[in-house]
């Protein structure tokens, strides 16, 4: 084949590769979304954000997802009982994300948290 058509072979290969990659459900790894919590949280304190709840205890900060593993409703933190409660079908989770009861099939995911310091000011960065 003439050298001038090499680009056409590459184009045909790329066009065939795309549906194959979709078929095997390949997707490149996503960059984590970083969420800053711009306040200091006292030991045994917590902050409720849209996608997670940040708890701070003697072991350090931890961020637990607020998305229920049943059908995805947003969980609320019940301070009196110290549990995360789903308002849709009443699944309950510990503040560490472990499933206690209800129809939710799995524990809640947690997210990596780093504490900001220095010029960044007090606060935390959560990688979703
Ligand atoms: S969506 Fe949470 S228990 Fe059903």
Image (cartoon, rainbow, N blue to C red):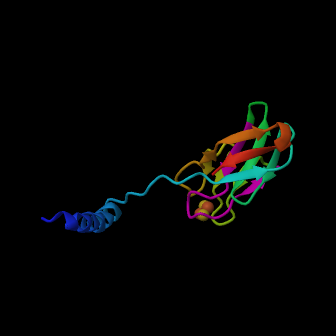
| Residue at 57% across, 48% down | 107
Left or right, residue 81 beside residue 1: right
Residue 121, x across and y down, in percent: 85, 43
Q: Quadrant of ligand 1?
A: bottom right
Total numbered badges shown on the rendered structure: 0
Which residues are drawn in magenta? 61-80
Residue at 79 percent of width and 31 percent of height: 58
Using residue 124 as the reference point, say whether residue 106 is left or right of it. left
Q: Residue at x 55, y 60 (%)?
A: 70
Residue 56 as seen in the image, left or right of residue 26: right
- Answer above or below: position of 70 versus 53: below
Query: Is there any visible trace of residue 8 in the rendered image?
Result: yes
- Which of 20/75 is in front? 20
Residue 88 in which image quadrant: bottom right
Location of the N terminus (image quadrant): bottom left
Q: Nearer the viewer, residue 53 or 76?
A: 53
Residue 65, percent from left and from top: 65, 52
- Front residue of this view, candidates 109 and 112: 112
The residue under the point 67% across, 56% down is 66
Magenta stretch holds residue 76: yes
Q: Is 32 placed above or below 60 here?
A: below
Assign the magenta stretch its main secondary structure.
loop
As drawn, 58 above or below 98 = above
Q: Is residue 95 visible?
A: no
Residue 50: percent from the left, percent from the top? 73, 60
59 in the magenta segment: no
């Amino acid at each position: 084949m003439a050298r001038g058509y090499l680009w056409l072979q590459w184009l045909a290969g790329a066009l065939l590769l795309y549906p194959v990659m979709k078929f095997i459900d390949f997707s490149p790894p996503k960059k984590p979304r970083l969420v800053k919590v711009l306040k200091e949280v006292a030991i045994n304190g917590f902050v409720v954000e849209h996608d997670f709840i940040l708890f701070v205890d003697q072991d350090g900060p931890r961020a637990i997802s607020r998305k229920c593993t049943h059908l995805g409703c947003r969980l609320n933190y019940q301070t009196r009982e110290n549990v995360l409660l789903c308002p849709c079908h009443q699944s309950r989770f510990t503040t560490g994300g472990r499933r206690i009861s209800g129809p939710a099939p799995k524990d809640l995911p947690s997210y990596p948290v780093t504490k900001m310091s220095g010029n960044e000011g007090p606060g935390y960065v959560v990688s979703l």
